Image (cartoon, rainbow, N blue to C red):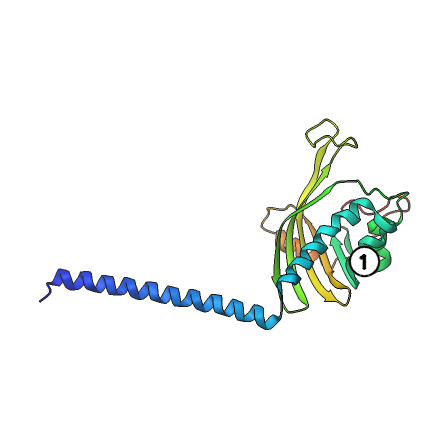
């Protein structure tokens, strides 16, 4: 016959085993639900790769001003939008201008935008969202590092993306750039910018100061 202390020890052991079993069941159920959602959404490994390649092409097109801005505009859907502190940049003509249509020449060896920490969240077989960190560097023309006298770190922030799968492949439906902001009102500021009307710069000034 077990003593009172023995019964208490056995009860504690059974309770602990029960808790572990419940936690394990919940974890397995969560994993199963995620797998089921991913499978039903039809989102594949190739979709992840294609979206990563889309994001990787972005700085080459933007920094290089390739094809008079057409390479940049081609990364977006026909109704695609880029949003920054200046407002919403909509339509191919505006996106192409941002991508370099007014530049005197292409700069294919230009290096400035570094995009890292890419997280992709599938929504369906043809839609997904993404977030990344952005660092923009000023690097000397001779390739010296940002620690040289002629180099500096220009800015840092985040991209928030909406991707859409088109007949031509994955494209940006919406790309929003947000400056680094550690304040409590950062999310409200980000949401406000999504509806802000773009104000074109004065003639001769080129893209807005925050075009990123």
Q: Is residue 102 left or right of residue 118?
A: right
Numbered disc total: 1
Which SS class for mark 1?
loop
**Residue at far bottom of view:** 40
- 112 with respect to 42 (left or right): right
Which residue is depicted at the point 19% across and 60% down? 9
| Residue 68 appears anywhere in the view | yes
* In the displayed structure image, the side of residue 204 where residue 47 appears, left or right: left
Vertical placement of 168 versus 190: above or below? below
Residue 34 in the image: state x and y as whole percent.
Answer: 52, 67
Q: Residue at x 80, y 53 (%)?
A: 72
- Which quadrant holds residue 147? top right
Question: Could you tell whether 206 is left or right of 133 in the image?
Answer: right
Image quadrant where residue 192 sits:
bottom right
Q: Return the residue nearer the eye: 45 or 144.
A: 45
- Can you give x and y, in whole percent of width and height, for residue 112 in the image? 74, 41
> Is residue 157 or residue 50 the one in the foreground?
50
| Depicted 212 relative to depicted 5: above or below | above
Q: Which quadrant of the rendered structure holds the N terminus?
A: bottom left
Q: Measuring from the top left, give residue 78's x and y in whole percent.
A: 81, 64
Which residue lies under the disc numbered 1?
74
Question: How packed is label 1: few (under 14 Cα within 10 Å), some, or many (20 or more)?
Answer: some
Residue 187, image x, y percentages: 62, 55
Which residue shows up at 75% across the image and 32% down it? 143
List the single residue furthest toward the front: 46
For the point 69% across and 41% down, the residue is: 155
Q: Nearer the viewer, residue 57 or 84?
A: 57
């Amino acid at each position: 016959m077990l003593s009172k202390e023995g019964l208490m020890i056995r009860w504690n052991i059974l309770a602990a085993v029960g808790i572990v079993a419940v936690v394990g069941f919940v974890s397995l159920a969560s994993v199963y639900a995620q797998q089921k959602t991913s499978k039903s959404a039809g989102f594949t490994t190739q979709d992840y790769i294609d979206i990563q390649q889309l994001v990787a092409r972005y700085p080459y097109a933007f920094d290089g001003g390739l094809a008079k801005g057409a390479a940049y505009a081609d990364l977006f859907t026909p109704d695609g939008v880029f949003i920054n502190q200046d407002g919403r940049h909509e339509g191919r003509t505006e996106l192409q201008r941002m991508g370099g249509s007014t530049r005197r020449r292409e700069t294919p060896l230009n290096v400035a935008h570094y995009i890292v920490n890419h997280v992709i969240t599938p929504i369906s077989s043809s839609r997904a969202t993404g977030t990344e960190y952005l660092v923009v560097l000023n690097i000397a023309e001779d390739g010296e590092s940002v620690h040289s006298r002629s180099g500096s770190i220009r800015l840092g922030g985040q991209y928030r993306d909406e991707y859409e799968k088109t007949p031509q492949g994955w494209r940006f439906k919406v790309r929003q750039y947000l400056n680094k902001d550690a304040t409590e009102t950062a999310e409200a500021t980000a949401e406000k910018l999504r509806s802000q009307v773009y104000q074109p710069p004065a003639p001769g000034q080129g893209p807005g100061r925050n075009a990123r």
